[in-house]
């Protein structure tokens, strides 16, 4: 499984990229708003993210009709070669995805919650599908079980003929809220987990690692003074 960072914060992206394990970034309108982003600076901001990360960067269309999404998608894709156009899973989004995919523009279909939505996104040519985990948990449903169903269903078929440029369709476990979500996504074989920076830090940490390191340092002090 690959790690993407789910943020629009340049400092977080630069820091996570320096750890050597970052494969991409996903953004959305909420994440851009959270860093105080302005409409006029949106394309420049995506360009800066694309320079920081060696991998796909999802930038979301906020249009509601297929023609507007297609126009948005073409403009976003022109920002940098590693831009992936993020499109909501809805009828207009599916129609736009088909057109963009046929033009060789990779699409990440977002706000995906169910198996039928995921299969439709795949057949419409999505390069990535983003099932949301945490938002299912928010409504007292089992987000991990829903993600598992999507991974299983997508794994039953070959979508290479549907995606832009015949590339492999990949599932991005999104709306990740804990290191346990990350572990469960990896165990079921999700291709990617897109993770907020705070959760990525928690993925690195473990109290037994800290305790073991503390013991090693103390014992090394004894060696130095022996
Ligand atoms: O990339 C979008 C997704 O990860 C949103 O997560 O926490 O707002 O449900 P959240």
Image (cartoon, rainbow, N blue to C red):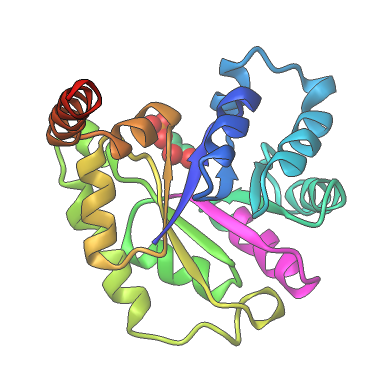
The reply to whether residue 135 is visible in this rendering is no
Tell me residue 99's x, y (percent).
75, 68
The answer to if 100 sits in the magenta stretch is yes
Tell me residue 69's x, y (percent).
73, 49
- First to last magenta residue range: 92-111
Does residue 122 appear left or right of residue 210 in this picture?
right
Q: Residue furthest front?
A: 226
Q: Is 128 above or below relative to 20?
A: below
Does residue 214 appear left or right of residue 82 in this picture?
left
Q: Is 100 above or below relative to 158?
A: above
Q: Nearer the viewer, residue 223 or 166?
A: 223
Q: Is 26 above or below relative to 108?
A: above
Q: How many marks?
A: 0
Tell me residue 72's x, y (percent).
79, 45
Quadrant location, the C terminus:
top left
Residue at 39% over, 62% down: 1
Residue at 28% over, 48% down: 182
Does residue 218 appear left or right of residue 157 in this picture?
left
Tell me residue 47's x, y (percent).
80, 38
Which quadrant of the frame does ligand 1 lie within? top left
Q: Nearer the viewer, residue 218 or 223?
A: 223
Locate residue 91: give its quadrant.
bottom right
Residue at 77% over, 42% down: 51
């Amino acid at each position: 499984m690959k790690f993407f960072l789910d943020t629009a914060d340049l400092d977080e992206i630069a820091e996570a990229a320096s750890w050597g394990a970052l494969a991409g970034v996903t953004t959305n309108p909420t994440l851009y708003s959270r860093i105080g982003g302005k409409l006029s600076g949106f394309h420049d901001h995506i360009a800066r993210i694309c320079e920081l990360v060696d991998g796909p960067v999802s930038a979301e269309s906020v249009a509601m009709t297929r023609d507007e999404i297609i126009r948005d998608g073409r403009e976003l894709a022109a920002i940098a070669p590693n831009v992936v156009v993020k499109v909501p899973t809805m009828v207009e989004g599916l129609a736009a995805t088909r057109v963009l995919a046929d033009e060789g523009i990779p699409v990440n279909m977002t706000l995906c919650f169910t198996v039928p939505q995921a299969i439709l996104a795949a057949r419409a040519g999505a390069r990535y599908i983003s099932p949301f985990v945490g938002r299912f948990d928010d409504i007292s449903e089992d987000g991990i079980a829903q993600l598992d169903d999507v991974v299983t269903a997508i794994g039953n078929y070959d979508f290479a003929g549907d995606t832009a440029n015949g590339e492999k369709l990949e599932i991005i476990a999104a709306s990740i809220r804990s290191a346990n979500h990350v572990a469960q996504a990896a165990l079921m074989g999700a291709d990617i987990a897109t993770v907020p920076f705070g959760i990525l830090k928690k993925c690195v940490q473990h109290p037994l690692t800290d305790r073991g390191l503390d013991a090693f340092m103390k014992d090394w002090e004894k060696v130095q003074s022996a």
